[in-house]
Image (tube, rainbow, N blue to C red):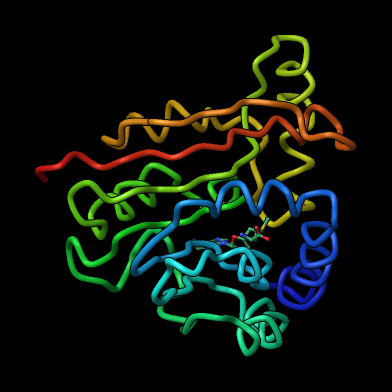
Amino acid sequence: MGFYERAVLPRVLNAACGTKAVEPLRSRVCRGLAGDVVEIGFGSGLNVPFYPASVTRVAAVEPSDTSWRLAAGRVRAASVPVQRSGLDGESLPFGDGSYDAALSTWTLCTIPDATVALAEVRRVLKPGGTLHFLEHGLAPDERVRRWQRRLDPLQKRLVGGCHLTRPIADLVTAAGFTITELDVFYEPGTMKATGADSLGVAVTPCQH
Ligand SMILES: C[S@@+](CC[C@H](N)C(=O)[O-])C[C@H]1O[C@@H](n2cnc3c(N)ncnc32)[C@H](O)[C@@H]1O
């Protein structure tokens, strides 16, 4: 990993993803989280202030040491214990069925293999466990999709491997989850190509 990915990009993401404008979205996606939670792509901990009181502890999975350092203040101020517990969403160091819920915000775009990561999340969730997700991905409109395909190579180079064209709901369903809530929308104040968001909750089967 070069200097840009290691030291610059985490700070850029902390600022770009930490705007007031997205706080209502973070609040919405965290609503209903309960029990032991694993958050993949924890970043600089921007979701921490939105964890509801029903959360008992959070296992943070985040490869970037810089992001984890940027999260320190939020982790200290958290109302629940938050521990950095893993480095890679594609390989979670937890037993099967060990978490009640999982949280992923603007992370499935960046994890190299989102299918593998979602299979891991499903594995570590208890039967009936929930995945709360807020992700940008493939837009609902073909005109926007064309722009996404054009911009994808640049986005990947500049934003640490971030893809614009991943079909989020399809990926979640293909991993064996049932989506129980889904809102697909363009994020206000953001270019449609980078702001085609899917916010939802998906549940694992009651029997693994
Ligand atoms: C756009 S940032 C979003 C951060 C945070 N979830 C948020 O909402 O502010 C994407 C995050 O995914 C992390 N990431 C990249 N590859 C990953 C992987 N294989 N497993 C887990 N997280 C990863 C990055 O380090 C980064 O913190």
List x then y, in percent, for residue 206: 15, 42
- Residue positioned most to the top: 142
**Horizontal placement of 87 versus 98: left or right?**
right
Relative to residue 177, is residue 37 depicted above or below?
A: below
Along the viewing direction, whichever of 94 and 115 lies nearer the viewer: 94
Q: Residue at x 84, y 34 (%)?
A: 188
Relative to 154, say whether 31 is above or below: below
Which quadrant of the structure image shows residue 121? bottom left
Identify the residue at horizontal 19%, vertical 69% (top origin). 95
Seen as rendered, the residue at the extreme front is: 53
Residue 1: percent from the left, percent from the top? 65, 72
Which residue is located at x 73 percent, y 49 percent?
24
172 vs 33: above or below? above
Residue 127 rendering spot, x and y as whole percentages? 17, 50
Question: Which residue is at 71% across, 75% downward?
Answer: 6
Quarter containing ligand 1?
bottom right
Q: Quadrant of residue 90?
A: bottom left
In this rendering, would 204 be left or right of 196?
left
Tell me the quadrant of the picture where the C terminus can be found: top left
- Residue 64: x, y in percent? 61, 75
Please count the marks in the image.
0
